[in-house]
């Protein structure tokens, strides 16, 4: 045992060391795995949250939070968002209580459908569109669906309202400038129609709009991580232009001014598919924008360059206001084969993207790696002298100055007149002295005359009204374009004749145009530069023709067609106003030109709503017969005020203001209903006066705050029932005090129970004898019919159900008044029976 003990100790020691080493290795591995897992989790979390943090090159330009707002039926709310040229992205977050999917949206009529619309430059107006969102398939709102909303010939894009809307649009998707989005709770011609009652569902929303910008103006992209090179521009004498540029230009540079824009950097070299972005500003109306690339060559030896220059595709993409791409651009061309010419470019910032395409395919025989295409970029802006435009600057161009006009309390209106030495007494001028007399080589018999005007900032809620009248048959064609000169193949709106025009466009509305008159409105014209072009025969005789032209910026189109009034409101930010028409009962539409109710229907509705109040004669007559003078005055006044109110509402006669008549109608109607209930209780006049005073105050508050809400009928009935109950309690407390239980607790519980039963039996007998229950049943039936007709009232069927409401509510009051018996004998017998019961109980 002594010899074996050392061996055992040694083995135990080795086993202990081995175990310690294995535990240490296992612990180290576990720790290493945990560290790797933590690092991996942090990396994933950082990648996932990368979009949540603003890049270092961006800053918040503006952030507006719109509070909780509720849109009632047929209401709308506009939001104006200004995006500066250096913006990087705009985020729109909108939460609402709308629970609507595409399946439900297809079944909802337009007049009750909540939608959201977007438009560039001015407020959207889906009521004026011939193409509804129902026809477009009711596609859900996505970021991709808003891309490319640019250009005034495009319709605004509308989508069904959703519960949660989260959008983030970058400067690569939409251009800078003024954008509007609007929320509508129902659209259609009936939206602007004046309504006596508005019923339907409402919804609430909150919104948050944040605009991010790039801190260096030369950066672009979603995260401001793309460099954009500005092109420096200066006047150029036209010498030493490349031969291909001279051939491409349609102007001979005799009187034009040529602005050359070049990059200040050395010639650029790009790889296959690698873009380079430039921008330049077209600050005024220009004739042409030319973009060219010279000295195009691969960065190879001189011998290789000569062989492959012609096959290289160096594509130039241009876009107004936003970064162009292969999928989204305004113009494109292979700059290696010739310059890109843009006729009549619009005013604003133009972005140019130069991209070598399929370089590796063209140079596949070259074994050199990293082949790059080098070039020098140039652009030219061609402008005519002041007052001239067109080929060889031979056509006249006039700048129209704005004159402000104030009409009442509405925002300003204005008319535009040419800046000439001639004095104009009226907001219109003769056209013949201003016309161009030189024709184009392609149009030998016609010339163009242009008029340039500016819609000021914040006035995009107005409408441009253009009128042209002549003594002879109209031989003018009118073209309008935002931001640039219109032409035969490039315009936003046009009018050639009565059969050939863009009157079907969303935002152009024609009025009373004929062979001798042109009259149209550009609805909600975008703020900025507009150019109106007249195409006309040359050498028009001043003695033979006399053409008068007027251009105005009006608040409401066509003065609401004389069927409504022009109102105005502010957008949600309070930065701009917009005007709209509030039409009468018979008309609707954005300009009140849609006849919703014809003359025959108007007469039918008027007679029905006014004459149905004659039913008030029945309760008034019965109240007078019973010498209930207060009730007689109420029913008579209620019937008269209701008839006057409806006569005023349908446009027949208004002895007082509409608001006063509306208040009197609803207040006296509420009072008549409640007084009917109070009449059923037999109480002294002093108590009745108190109840009537309290009820008058409550019903007056209801009539002055929100008289047309559907819950009022329930509130009025509840007040009436409460008044009747209070009357009964007063009657019991004054006449039947003998029924109060004695303070002494009776030991004969059985006899007490019999007394209570007898008292209840006598009370029911009294109620039964007090009222004629046949009339009472008829009264409740008529009252139920009145409540049903009140709840069935809609905008379209209001006149039918409200006329039935008049008949049934007055008829129910008549039946209730007739149901009351004379109660003196009944009360005496009831009191005597009560006394006997009380005496019997006291004996016990």
Image (tube, grey):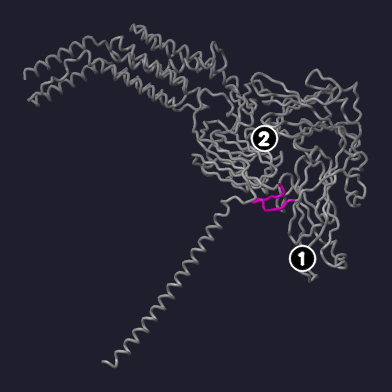
Q: Nearer the viewer, residue 64 or 72?
A: 64
In magenta segment, residue 453: no
Residue 164 falls left or right of residue 325: left
Q: Which residue is mark 1?
A: 360
Residue 524 falls left or right of residue 68: right
* Residue 329 at x, y percent in the picture: 73, 49
Q: Nearer the viewer, residue 126 or 85?
A: 85
Q: What residue lies at 65% left-to-right and 38% top-to-bottom? A: 82
Q: What residue lies at 79% left-to-right and 27% top-to-bottom? A: 401
**In the rendered view, would you say 267 is above or below 469?**
below
Q: What residue lies at 57% left-to-right and 54% top-to-bottom? A: 50
Residues shaded magenta: 217-228
* Residue 321 at x, y percent in the picture: 72, 44
Q: Earlier in the sequence, mark 1 or mark 2?
A: 2
**Number of numbered labels in the structure image:** 2
- Disc 1 vs disc 2: Cβ atoms closer than 8 Å? no
Q: Nearer the viewer, residue 553 or 575?
A: 575
Task: Name the quadrant containing residue 9.
Answer: bottom left
Classify mark 2: residues with Cα within 10 Å, few (<14), some (14-19) or many (20+).
many
Q: Which residue is mark 2?
A: 122
Q: Quadrant of the C terminus?
A: top left
* Residue 47 at x, y percent in the picture: 56, 58
Task: Name the quadrant containing residue 666.
Answer: top left
The answer to whether residue 290 of the structure is visible from this angle is no
Measure how far apart labels 1 and 2 are at the Cα level: 46 Å
* Residue 691 at x, y percent in the picture: 34, 15
At numbered mark 2, what does the secondary structure look like: helix, strand or loop?
A: loop
At numbered mark 1, what does the secondary structure look like: helix, strand or loop?
A: helix
Residue 759 falls left or right of residue 22: left
Q: Nearer the viewer, residue 493 or 291?
A: 291
In magenta segment, residue 227: yes
């Amino acid at each position: 045992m002594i010899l074996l003990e050392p061996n055992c100790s040694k083995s135990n020691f080795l086993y202990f060391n081995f175990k310690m080493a294995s535990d240490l290795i296992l612990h180290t591995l576990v720790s290493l795995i945990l560290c790797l897992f933590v690092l991996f989790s942090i990396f994933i979390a950082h990648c996932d949250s990368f979009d949540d943090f603003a890049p270092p090159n961006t800053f918040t330009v503006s952030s507006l939070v719109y509070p909780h707002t509720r849109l009632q039926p047929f209401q709308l709310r506009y939001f104006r968002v200004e995006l500066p040229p250096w913006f990087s992205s705009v985020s729109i977050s909108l939460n609402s209580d709308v629970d609507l999917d595409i399946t439900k949206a297809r079944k909802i009529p337009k007049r009750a459908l909540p939608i959201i619309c977007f438009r560039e430059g001015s407020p959207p107006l889906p009521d004026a569109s011939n193409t509804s969102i129902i026809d477009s398939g009711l596609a859900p709102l996505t970021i991709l669906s808003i891309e490319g909303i640019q250009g005034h010939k495009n319709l605004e894009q509308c989508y069904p309202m959703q519960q949660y809307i989260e959008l983030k649009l970058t400067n690569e998707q939409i251009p800078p400038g003024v954008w509007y989005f609007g929320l509508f709770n129902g659209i259609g011609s009936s939206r602007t129609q004046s309504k006596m009652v508005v019923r339907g569902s409402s919804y609430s929303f909150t919104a948050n709009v944040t605009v991010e910008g790039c801190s260096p103006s030369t950066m672009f992209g979603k995260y401001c991580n793309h460099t954009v090179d500005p092109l420096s521009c200066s006047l150029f004498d036209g010498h030493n232009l490349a031969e291909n540029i001279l051939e491409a230009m349609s102007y001979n540079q005799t009187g034009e001014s040529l602005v050359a824009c070049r990059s200040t950097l050395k010639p650029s070299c790009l790889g296959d598919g690698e873009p380079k972005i430039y921008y330049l500003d077209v600050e005024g109306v220009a004739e042409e924008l030319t973009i060219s690339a010279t000295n195009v060559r691969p960065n190879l030896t001189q011998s290789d360059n000569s062989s492959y220059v012609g096959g290289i595709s160096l594509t130039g993409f241009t876009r107004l206001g936003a970064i162009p791409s292969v999928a989204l651009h305004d113009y494109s061309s292979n700059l290696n084969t010739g310059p890109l010419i843009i006729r009549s470019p619009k005013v604003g910032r133009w972005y140019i993207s130069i991209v070598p395409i399929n370089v590796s395919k063209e140079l596949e025989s070259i074994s050199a790696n990293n082949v790059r295409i080098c070039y020098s970029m140039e652009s030219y802006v061609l402008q005519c002298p002041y007052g001239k435009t067109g080929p060889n600057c031979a056509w006249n161009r006039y700048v129209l100055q704005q004159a402000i006009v104030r009409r009442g309390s509405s925002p300003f209106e204005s008319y535009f007149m040419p800046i000439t030495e001639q004095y104009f007494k009226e907001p219109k001028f003769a056209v013949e002295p201003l016309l161009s007399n030189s024709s184009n080589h392609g149009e030998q018999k016609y010339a163009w005359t242009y008029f340039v005007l500016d819609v000021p900032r914040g006035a995009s809620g107005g409408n441009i009204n253009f009128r042209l009248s002549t003594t002879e048959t109209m031989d003018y064609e009118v073209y309008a374009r935002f931001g640039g000169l219109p032409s035969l193949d490039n315009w936003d709106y046009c009018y050639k004749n009565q059969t050939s025009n863009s009157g079907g466009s969303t935002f152009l509305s024609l009025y009373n145009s004929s062979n001798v008159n042109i009259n149209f409105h550009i609805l909600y014209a975008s703020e900025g530069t507009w150019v109106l072009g007249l195409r006309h025969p040359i050498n028009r005789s001043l003695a033979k023709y006399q053409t008068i032209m007027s251009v105005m910026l009006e608040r409401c189109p066509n003065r609401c067609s004389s069927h409504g009034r022009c109102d105005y409101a502010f957008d949600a930010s309070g930065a701009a106003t917009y005007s709209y028409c509030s039409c009468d009962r018979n008309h609707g539409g954005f300009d009140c030109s849609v006849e919703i109710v014809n003359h025959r229907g108007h007469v039918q509705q008027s007679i029905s709503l006014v004459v149905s109040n004659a039913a008030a004669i029945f309760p008034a007559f019965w109240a007078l017969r019973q010498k209930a003078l207060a009730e007689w005055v109420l029913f008579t006044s209620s019937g008269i005020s209701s008839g006057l109110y409806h006569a005023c509402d349908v446009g027949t006669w208004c002895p007082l203001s509409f608001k006063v008549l509306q208040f009197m109608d609803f207040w006296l109607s509420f009072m008549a209903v409640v007084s009917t209930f109070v009449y059923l209780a037999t109480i002294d006049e002093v108590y009745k006066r108190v109840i009537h005073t309290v009820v008058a105050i409550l019903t007056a508050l209801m009539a002055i705050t929100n008289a047309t809400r559907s819950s009022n009928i329930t509130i009025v009935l509840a007040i009436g029932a409460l008044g009747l109950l209070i009357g009964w309690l007063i009657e019991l407390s004054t006449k039947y005090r003998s029924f109060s239980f004695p303070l002494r607790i009776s030991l004969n519980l059985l006899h007490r129970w019999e007394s209570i039963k007898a008292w209840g039996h006598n009370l029911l007998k009294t109620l039964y004898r007090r009222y004629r229950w046949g009339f009472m049943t008829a009264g409740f039936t008529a009252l139920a019919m009145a409540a049903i007709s009140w709840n069935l009232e809609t905008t379209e069927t209001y006149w039918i159900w409200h006329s039935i409401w008049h008949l049934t509510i007055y008829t129910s009051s008549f039946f209730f008044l007739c149901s009351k018996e004379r109660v003196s004998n009944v009360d005496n017998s009831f009191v005597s029976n009560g006394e006997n019961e009380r005496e019997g109980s006291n004996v016990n």
